[in-house]
């Protein structure tokens, strides 16, 4: 059975449509990749086969041929690891659901089956919308901006197992980018930023306040230290108020 999985190739920051064709045949064990792959794409056979082994699918006594079309475009990067793995599972009937041509897969594979980001991930996601795809499976990267595009459903996945689960109809726990919570409702009369220097002492006082740790000041009190303690008292009072209100 020949499986055809859609993906995206990158030429600089421009993306183009790539069809990953996979066929598995009985015979001497081999893994061939054709379609002008560079060295990083040729290495995919080791990553993909090991990731599939970790998932529980072994390529034993099988000849696997992967064709990256269009053949005249040079392919580079580990972006095709995920579509190759999905194509093999589809070709061997492990995945039986129909995968529409408007669904594409991008992502590198770790040896344990984890899906990893790659260079040009954001450009590939933007290209998916431009190329007319409606669903894209891709790894989640917390430090990238929140990607939301009308008409494109982005499915963030962290492992090959999650991709297969989602294709079979199971829901995934959504990923969320960490967001800084700013509370502008509290105005501090004094702040440690008003004190120049004494970074070690200020850091120690902040840790003491956050952990409710008792500290002992073993030194004579001069003007600077008294100023630090006054700021700390106000800071600790506001911290305790916010901490108790969230309990």
Image: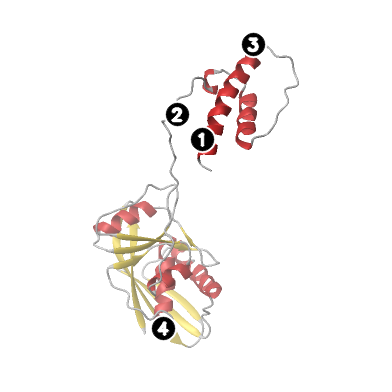
Q: In the rendered view, does 125 fall on the left or right side of 65?
A: left
> Which mark identifies residue 193?
none
Distance of label 1 from label 3 (alpha carbons): 29 Å
**Location of residue 139 by image quarter:** bottom left
Q: Which mark is residue 223?
A: 3
Residue situated furthest bottom in the rendering? 26
Q: Residue 8 occupies which quadrant of the picture?
A: bottom left
Rounded to the nearest whole Å, what is the CA distance between mark 4 and mark 2?
A: 60 Å
Report crowding for label 2: few under 14, some 14 to 19, many 20 or more residues within 10 A (C-alpha): few
The correct choice, above or below, for 26 with respect to 147 in the image is below
- Choose the circle earlier in sequence order: 4 or 2: 4
Question: Disc 1 or 2, which lies upstream in sequence?
Answer: 2
Task: Locate residue 243, reporting x and y percent.
Answer: 54, 37
For label 2, the SS is: loop
Say which mark, if any, is on residue 93.
4
| Residue 31 position in % (x across, y down) | 47, 77
Question: In the rendered structure, are the residues bearing label 1 and label 2 in contact, judged by CB atoms less than 8 Å apart?
Answer: yes
């Amino acid at each position: 059975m020949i499986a055809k999985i859609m993906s995206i190739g990158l030429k600089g920051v421009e993306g183009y449509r790539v069809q990953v064709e996979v066929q598995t045949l009985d015979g001497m064990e081999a893994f061939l990749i054709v379609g002008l792959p560079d060295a990083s794409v040729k290495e995919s056979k080791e990553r993909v086969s090991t990731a599939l082994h970790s998932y529980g699918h072994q390529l034993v006594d099988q000849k696997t041929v992967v064709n990256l079309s269009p053949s005249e475009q040079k392919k580079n990067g580990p972006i095709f690891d995920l579509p190759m793995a999905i194509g093999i599972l589809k070709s061997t009937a492990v995945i039986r659901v129909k995968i529409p041509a408007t669904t594409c897969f991008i992502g590198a594979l770790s040896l344990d089956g984890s899906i990893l980001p790659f260079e040009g991930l954001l450009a590939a996601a933007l290209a998916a919308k431009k190329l007319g795809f409606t669903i894209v499976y891709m790894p989640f990267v917390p430090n990238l901006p929140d990607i939301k595009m009308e008409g494109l459903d982005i499915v963030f996945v962290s492992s090959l197992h999650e991709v297969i689960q989602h294709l079979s109809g199971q829901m995934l726990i959504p990923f969320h980018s960490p967001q800084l919570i700013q509370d502008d409702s509290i105005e501090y009369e004094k702040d440690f930023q008003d004190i120049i220097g004494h970074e070690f002492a200020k850091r120690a006082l902040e840790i003491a306040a956050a952990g409710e740790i008792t500290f002992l000041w073993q030194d004579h009190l001069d003007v600077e230290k008294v100023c630090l303690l006054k700021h700390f008292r106000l800071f600790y009072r506001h911290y305790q108020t916010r901490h108790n209100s969230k309990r």
